[in-house]
Image (tube, helix red, strand yellow):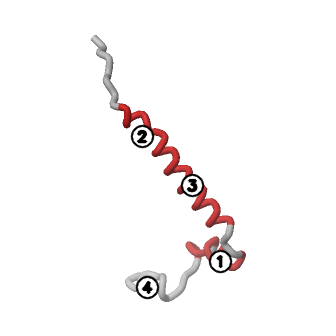
């Protein structure tokens, strides 16, 4: 019923490459988030709550 699956040699490296890629991106994003200045962090923290004329929907009264 079950047959043995033949996997090429290069297919063994795909999980390692995928994990390495994920780890590099995660570390880069983490370092970038930790290096953001206090003013930028404060601005980004309240960004969804701002109601500027530039960001508001012009069709809304």
- Separation of marks 2 and 4 at Cα, in angstroms: 54 Å
Give the SS element for disc 4. loop
Question: In the image, is residue 41 above or below residue 12?
Answer: below
Q: Are the two marked residues, 2 and 4, in contact with CB atoms closer than 8 angstroms?
A: no
Classify residue 41 by image quadrant: bottom right
Give the labeled residue for mark 3. 26
Q: Are the two marked residues, 2 and 1, in contact with CB atoms closer than 8 angstroms?
A: no
Give the SS element for disc 3. helix
For the point 37% across and 35% down, the residue is 11
Mark 4 or mark 1: whose residue is earlier in sequence: 1
Give the labeled residue for mark 2. 14
Near-viewer residue (27 or 14): 14
Give the labeled residue for mark 1. 40
- Separation of marks 3 and 1 at Cα, in angstroms: 21 Å
From the image, which quarter does the C terminus lie in?
Answer: bottom left
Near-viewer residue (61 or 51): 51
């Amino acid at each position: 019923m079950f047959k043995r699956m033949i996997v090429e040699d290069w297919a063994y490296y795909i999980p390692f490459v995928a994990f390495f890629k994920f780890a590099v991106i995660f570390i880069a994003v983490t370092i970038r988030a930790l290096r953001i200045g206090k003013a930028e962090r404060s601005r980004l923290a309240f960004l969804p709550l701002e109601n500027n004329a530039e960001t508001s929907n012009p069709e809304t009264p």
